């Protein structure tokens, strides 16, 4: 399920963009949801919930909080969302590239639809590397989940607790050992930071003071014996991105 956010205080334009994206995704038989936000503030109020949107279209020239400022707030939570700036006139500032913008798109360009299609093609290409799904038999029922939506897995008394970013943070449980799951998720950048915690590297914000801080602000303890390995692995992963 692809989730896209459009932040624009011009409602007419936001609807036009939604129409083009709807057409693009329907032509490709992709299940999607598109949410409109009339300001940057309304969007960043979501906090960690912003992570549910894989793609965010931001108008650069919004009143109060502009697109660049909004993007900086998004980046404080995640490096993974694809941010696209749309603007009424070319702004030659390089700030957009500091927040990892995928594209700058001109609103009044005659090729606007083609620009959106090309931009989405580029995003889909990058995302295809990410959309791995696995089926798990949880006590709550069998579920096919996106591997990248797993925040971390905790081992508790012969049970595993999966903390998953769906519409907010959901928790599912199953019987099993962390070793088994660690082997199963070996190729997906998960890190064993503790006997009881297996964490998705993409959601680690920083490693400091014998703790791992996740992008939702949660802190997990790292034992002294593992600390250097955890820190080095995190730094190496950040360098690869």
Image (spheres, rainbow, N blue to C red):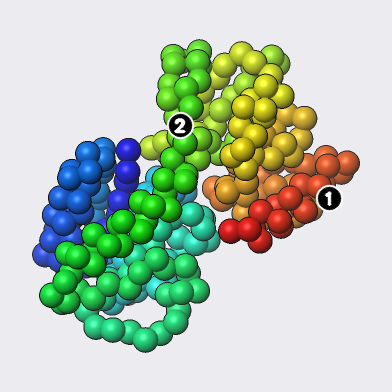
189 or 73: which is nearer to us? 189
Residue drawn where x is 50% and y is 16% of the image = 138
26 or 162: which is nearer to us? 26
Provide residue 59's location: percent of width, then percent of height.
28, 70
The span from disc 2 to disc 1 (Cα, nearest Å) is 31 Å
Examine the rendered structure and indicate whether residue 197 appears above or below residue 210: above
Secondary structure under tag 2 reads strand
Provide residue 155's location: percent of width, then percent of height.
68, 24
- Which quadrant of the structure image shows residue 58? bottom left
Residue 154 appears in the rendering: no
Q: Residues within 10 Å of mark 1 (few under 14, many from 20)?
A: some
Which residue in the structure is indicated by mark 2? Answer: 133
Q: Which mark is residue 228?
A: 1
**Quarter placement of the N terminus:** top left
Q: Which mark is residue 37?
A: none
Q: Tell me: 167 left or right of 18.
A: right
Q: Tell me: 25 left or right of 139.
A: left
- Point out the tag, 2 or 1, that comes first from the N-terminus: 2
Residue drawn where x is 62% and y is 46% of the image = 201
* Mark 2 vs mark 1: in front: 2
Examine the rendered structure and indicate whether residue 176 appears above or below residue 165: above
């Amino acid at each position: 399920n692809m989730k896209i956010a459009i932040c624009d205080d011009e409602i007419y334009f936001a609807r036009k963009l939604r129409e083009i994206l709807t057409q693009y995704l329907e032509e490709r038989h992709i299940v999607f949801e598109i949410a409109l936000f009339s300001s940057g503030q309304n969007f960043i109020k979501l906090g960690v919930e912003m992570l549910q949107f894989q793609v965010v279209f931001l108008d650069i020239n919004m009143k109060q909080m502009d697109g660049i400022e909004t993007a900086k707030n998004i980046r404080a939570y995640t490096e993974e969302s694809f941010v696209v700036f749309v603007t009424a006139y070319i702004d030659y500032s390089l700030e957009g590239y500091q927040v990892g913008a995928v594209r700058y798109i001109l609103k009044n360009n005659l090729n606007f639809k083609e620009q959106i299609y090309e931009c989405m093609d580029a995003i889909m290409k990058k995302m295809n590397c990410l959309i791995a799904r696995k089926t798990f038999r949880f006590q709550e029922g069998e579920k096919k989940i996106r591997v990248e939506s797993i925040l971390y897995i905790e081992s508790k008394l012969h049970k595993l607790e999966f903390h998953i970013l769906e519409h907010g943070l959901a928790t599912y449980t199953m019987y099993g050992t962390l070793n088994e799951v660690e082997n199963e998720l070996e190729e997906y950048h998960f890190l064993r930071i503790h006997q009881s915690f297996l964490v998705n590297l993409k959601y680690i914000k920083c490693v400091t003071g014998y703790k791992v801080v996740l992008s939702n602000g949660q802190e997990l303890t790292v034992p002294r014996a593992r600390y250097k390995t955890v820190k080095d692995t995190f730094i190496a992963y950040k360098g690869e991105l």
